[in-house]
Image (cartoon, helix red, strand yellow):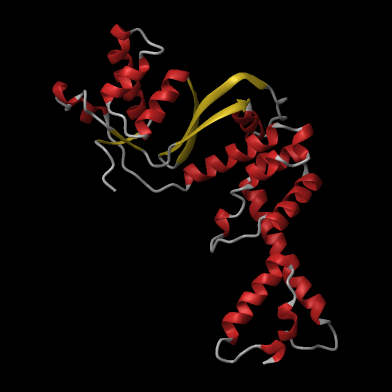
């Protein structure tokens, strides 16, 4: 075999070397490329590598349309190719390529002029992640109504697996919505303090909403397995103790109405 390949494992080695060329530019595979009088081996390999990088660029543009809009074509392409060089794809599915872009942007020079970019990347990936989450049935209010009163204290909720929680410093969701609607981008505005946001999928639609600080805490506690009694105890930091049970029950009813609750009971997996 050309290039020093062993016939016992030549295909596997060839595949690994070709992948190394695509992702890192390692040229070991060059020796396995057949000679041609019309096109050099280097050029033929470069065509494949460019096509591979362009496919990754398309994947990033598909995953981050609002970020693309904020940056424009030229700056987005420069950002994307820099990310491709720094974070080669290691997944079998291209759907997962780009999951570190928000972290990459935190230290990127673009952030100095546009600090909202990293958070926009985080929000867009969260929307994508919620949409692709596993399917789950959700309960209705009638199931909550059938729960005996004596069981409420120990009640635990199993939440929709598509739920994602984020605390955002900027008006990122409003920026994203304006871009998605085709309206002129809003000016980035930093919140006086981080705002809790909930992202989830319900009835084949990705939804999101802001949360008051007490509800954000209650959702996080529920996700960690805290029962109704524990939720009520924690809510006393914001709500008068006498009104906490009614307030907590109203929140749970709203969660059920929004398709956030999969079952009354702890996770069994």
At x 77%, y 71%, the residue is 47
Against 65, residue 43 (above or below) is below
Q: Is residue 259 visible?
A: no
Q: Can residue 232 be seen in this view?
A: yes
Of the pair 212 and 87, the residue shown nearer to us: 87
Image x and y of residue 126, in percent: 54, 40
Along the horizontal axis of the image, is 97 left or right of 187? Answer: left
- Quadrant of the rendered structure where residue 182 is? top right
Along the horizontal axis of the image, is 18 left or right of 204? Answer: right
- Quadrant of the rendered structure where residue 233 is? top left
Image x and y of residue 200, in percent: 45, 37
At x 36%, y 17%, the residue is 235
Along the horizontal axis of the image, is 7 left or right of 45? Answer: left
Of the pair 161 and 154, the residue shown nearer to us: 154
At x 34%, y 44%, the residue is 136
Image x and y of residue 12, in percent: 57, 81
Q: How many marks?
A: 0
- Quadrant of the rendered structure where residue 267 is? top left
Of the pair 5 and 183, the residue shown nearer to us: 5
At x 32%, y 24%, the residue is 252
Against 245, residue 223 (above or below) is below
Which quarter shows the N terminus? Answer: bottom right
Along the horizontal axis of the image, is 33 left or right of 265? Answer: right
Image x and y of residue 202, in percent: 41, 38
């Amino acid at each position: 075999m050309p290039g020093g390949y062993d016939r016992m494992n030549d295909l596997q080695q060839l595949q690994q070397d070709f992948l190394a060329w695509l992702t890192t530019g390692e040229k070991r595979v060059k020796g396995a490329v057949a000679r041609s009088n019309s096109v050099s081996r280097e050029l033929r390999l470069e065509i494949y590598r460019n096509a591979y990088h362009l496919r990754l660029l398309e994947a990033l543009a598909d995953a981050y349309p609002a970020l693309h809009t904020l940056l424009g074509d030229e700056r987005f392409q420069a950002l994307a190719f820099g990310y491709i060089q720094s974070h080669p794809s290691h997944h079998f599915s291209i759907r997962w390529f780009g999951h570190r872009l928000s972290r990459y942007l935190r230290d990127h020079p673009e952030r100095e002029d546009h600090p909202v970019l990293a958070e926009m990347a985080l929000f867009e990936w969260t929307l994508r992640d919620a949409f692709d989450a596993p399917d789950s049935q959700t309960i209705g209010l009638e199931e909550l109504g059938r729960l005996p009163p004596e069981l409420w204290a120990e009640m635990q909720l199993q939440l929709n697996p598509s739920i994602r929680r984020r605390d955002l410093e900027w008006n990122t969701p409003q920026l994203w919505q304006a871009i998605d609607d085709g309206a002129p981008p809003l000016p980035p505005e930093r919140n006086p303090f981080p705002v809790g946001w909930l992202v989830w999928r319900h009835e084949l639609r990705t939804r999101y909403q802001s949360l008051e600080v007490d509800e954000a805490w209650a959702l996080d506690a529920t996700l960690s397995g805290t029962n109704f009694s524990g939720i009520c105890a924690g809510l006393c930091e914001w709500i008068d103790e006498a009104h906490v049970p009614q307030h907590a029950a109203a929140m749970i009813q709203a969660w059920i109405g929004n398709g956030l609750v999969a079952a009354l009971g702890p996770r069994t997996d």
